[in-house]
Image (cartoon, grey):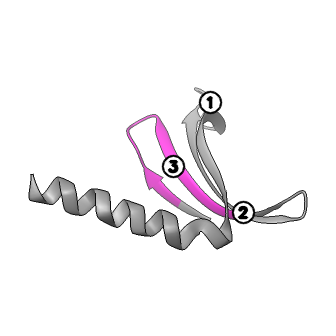
Amino acid sequence: MIEVTKNSREVIRIERQDFRGYDILNVRVFYDDGSGEYRPGKQGLAIRTELVPDLLDAIHGAVSVMEAA
């Protein structure tokens, strides 16, 4: 699992999982519930791992457009 700090109350967790026989990459926002424990929020994305290269290409394209602006 990889964790990226989103802000003081939330982290983004990236994790490879098996879901009903599918190999997926789960990217989800977790929030601090006040007790120091992180709970999964509604925001997130679950994508089959074979689609990850296409998603990365799209992200790189979006970053290129932002840098050009």
Residue labelled with disc 1: 35
- The kind of secondary structure the magenta stretch mainly shows is strand
Mark pair 1, 3: CA separation: 18 Å
The magenta stretch spans residue 4: yes
Residue labelled with disc 2: 24
Comparing labels 2 and 3, the label whose residue is closer to the camera:
2
Pointer 1 or 2: first along the chain: 2
The quadrant in which the N terminus is found is bottom right
Identify which residue is drawn at 90% across, 57% down. Answer: 20
Is residue 69 rendered to the left or right of residue 4? Answer: left
* 53 versus 35 height, above or below: below
Q: x, y (%) of residue 51?
A: 61, 67
Residue labelled with disc 3: 12
Task: State the extent of the magenta-drawn residues as a range.
Answer: 3-16
Q: Classify mark 2: residues with Cα within 10 Å, few (<14), some (14-19) or many (20+).
A: many
Element on which disc 1 rests: loop
Query: What amino acid is at disc 2?
Result: Ile
Q: Which of 53 and 8 is in front in this view?
A: 53
Q: x, y (%) of residue 60?
A: 33, 66
Query: What amino acid is at disc 3?
Result: Ile
Mark pair 1, 2: CA separation: 30 Å
